[in-house]
Image (cartoon, rainbow, N blue to C red):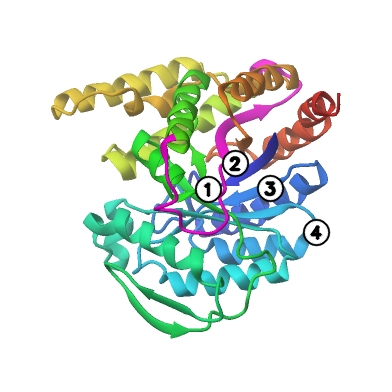
Amino acid sequence: MKFSVIFEAQLADPTVEREHQLIRDSVEQAVLAEEMGFDRIWAVEHHSLKWYAHMSAPEIFLTWVAARTSTIRIGHGVVCMPFRFNHPARVAERAAMLDLLSGGRLDLGAGRGGTLQETSLCGVDKERTTQEVEEALQIIGKAWRSEELEHHGALLDIDPHPILPRPQQTPHPPLFLACSRTETLTQAAELGIGALVMGFAGPESIAGMRAAYDAAIAGRSDARFVSSVVNDHFSVLCPTIVLDDREAARSVGIRGQRFFAQSIGHWYGGAGIPDEAVVEGADEAAAMREAAEQVVARLHEHDIPVRPTSTATFNADHAYGTADDAIAYVERLRDAGADEIMCLVQMGTVPQEACMETLRQWGEKVIPYFRAQEAG
């Protein structure tokens, strides 16, 4: 099993000064992650999503981290693949350059960037995003499998051109897709690429998603494969804060997750501005339940069906507490079928010292526990 850290670059009270410090803090966390034995870091790509994600240029962030590290893998989790965000030929060029300079450490995930806030910034057609993502993956998957890329698809025509430079990994870095529904899990399996899964609903939900992914793998042909190399890797998000003080870790973690849930709800579901205040001694579990109830009430008010996914981000049962608590939770994710645990530590209200201590605790106690099991 692999262990990684994912960066959204979330920011409460987003002043310019705090934003700049946040990016520098994220680099510091990524460098520590390598020292602590993590296998990979992931960086998202989002645009204009104040509060939720200030990571608008992950290719620059990942390049900077690659230059500061030597062994940890560097992951795009994900590139926004609709063509007006990133032309697939340009994605291929940038990915190859970073893979080369990092010594073959790059992983490349794809996603839609489908919020109205983002698509309106770059003139992306929301109705075409799913189709454009798949065609972009087809292009990237064959960009270096011959001397020149030629592509004539439903949306793009590219006459023969060399894609330069060539990546160090052959034929290209491993490919992934962001997956939050059964439909995208099936798509990832049929395309022959890995799944990056949001895990807020908990291990039972993850087990169901793994079953859907495996069923699609078992029933697929190679007709939709985007590459000659198949990557059936199942990565699962794991919100976590680990400190010696269990209750302090739960308070910090659940508060951070509440900010995450409210900020994603603002941009994806039209909810209000996220609550940025951190109140000493507050009952964060109760505040999380209240926030979830407010979401449900708003959905009822607008006659929108309330599904399990509607409130999944408000589920506070995650790896918050001591290292032993984190180990117990990761065992549940492993049993649910996770190939990789993507630690979400950097949430908007979580202070840098808690992020750094969490990474240390994982590196000194949690990861070694599972490495020892595997060695045995």
Q: Is 271 a magenta residue?
A: no
> Visible in this render: residue 279?
no
Q: Is residue 188 left or right of residue 229?
A: left
Q: Are marks 2 and 1 in contact (CB under 8 Å)?
A: yes
Location of the C terminus by quadrant is top right
Taking the image as shown, residue 324 lies to the left or right of residue 96, namely: right
Mark closer to the chain start, 2 or 1: 1
**How many marks can you see?**
4
- Seen from the viewer's position, the closer of residues 276 and 267 is 267
Determine the CA span between mark 3 and mark 1.
Answer: 15 Å
Alpha carbon distance from label 4 to label 2: 22 Å
User: Distance of mark 2 from mark 1, alpha carbons?
Assistant: 7 Å
**Of the pair 323 and 109, the residue shown nearer to us:** 109
Which x, y percent locates residue 2? 69, 38
In the rendered image, which residue does mark 4 sit on?
Answer: 70
Identify the residue at image location x=58%, y=81%. Answer: 164
